[in-house]
Image (cartoon, rainbow, N blue to C red):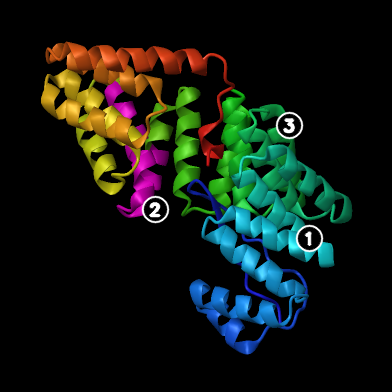
Amino acid sequence: MAVRAVALALGGVSLAAIALSQEVPVPQRIQEMLNARDYSGAERAIAEELRRLPEWNTGHLLIAQIYARTGRYELAEQSASAAIRQRESLDGFMLLAVATMRLGRLNDSISWLEQAARRYPGYGEIYKILGLDYALGGVLRESEKAFAKAVALQPGDWESHYYQGRTLFELRRFREAREALRRAVHLNGASVKGWTALGQTQERLGQVEAAETSYRQALSACEDGRECAWPLLQLGFLYRTRNVPEQALALFRRAVKVRPDWARPHFHLGKELAETGDLRAARRELEEAVKLDESRSEYHYQLALVYRWLGEAEKASTQLARFRALADLKSHVEPVPEFAQP
């Protein structure tokens, strides 16, 4: 009986599931838990089975997937390594590649993927994850080549087209990016991130009306869920450039409402509020942005300005000092494309 895959995710960007490709014996009660997505129950049952049968290779792979799904990447690596020591497999290599990528060990992840590619050259998911590794490392040209290989091997996989399009966008090859993203939304018309990325690309090409249509397609697909935050922001930026601040403000408020744990909507709402003169409300939003993501220099700079306008000189000086420190650090670090950030 083939084992159901456990989906993995990279910062909100879901990776295709790593399916266990072997026909393997799995106790029926464990299979039923996996089918029902009772992963905590399955984890306990698999661990119990592994204590009895420590050489059960599939058990190591299954529990590694559960660990990866729940963000316990050190344990995922340990379990996948145990499986690989017993028998090399595509599943083991892929789990090790994802676990080490999420642990920030990109060279190790690439090494596992290279081993997988030598043994299973026709498996497109290898090149999709390889593309993400290169993107995380800031090596965008190699990233795009990997995604292109993934597209060639699995042309029906919309996410490979999406990743390729996003990388082409970062490389400022906007016409090629637009075509890749059009293919992505053709294959998956319900993809919020596909429509939003297409809109961004259309904007860069001066196709503003087409961009607005794409953003609204994204909003139709997300139905006021968390995914709506990105297209709401992009549409807000569009209205800001059209000098319609009240529309931009309303969109930024909606973005904060649907995803309050994302720093960027708070930042742009705070910035817009400051421009309208509502400095106390702006301070609240900017303080929340800094609390959620302390690493963005522009958040500290904008908050410093608001503190200064409110007459809070000491707080303004603290934020300016943090801004300068982060800006100096940023000048020495290769930026990572946001679609690839964990």
Specify whether 337 is left or right of 2.
left
Residue receiving disc 2: 221
Residue 90's tag is 1
Instruction: Pinpoint residue 295: horizontal percent, then vertical percent.
Output: 42, 27
Secondary structure at badge 1 equals helix
Instruction: Please give the residue where the numbered disc 3 appears in the rendered image.
Output: 142
Numbered disc in front, either 3 or 1: 1
Separation (CA) of disc 1 from disc 2: 34 Å
Q: CA distance from mark 3 to mark 1?
A: 22 Å
Label 1 crowding class (10 Å Cα cut-off): few <14, some 14-19, many 20+?
many
Q: Is residue 9 above or below residue 84?
A: above
Magenta highlight range? 213-240
In the picture as drawn, the residue positioned furthest to the bottom comes out as: 28
As drawn, which residue projects farthest toward the right? 118
SS of the residue under disc 3: helix
Return the x and y of residue 54 as percentages of the image width and height: 74, 76
Count of all numbered marks drawn on residues in the image: 3
Indicate which disc, 3 or 1, sits on the residue closer to the N terminus. 1
Residue 16 in sight here: no
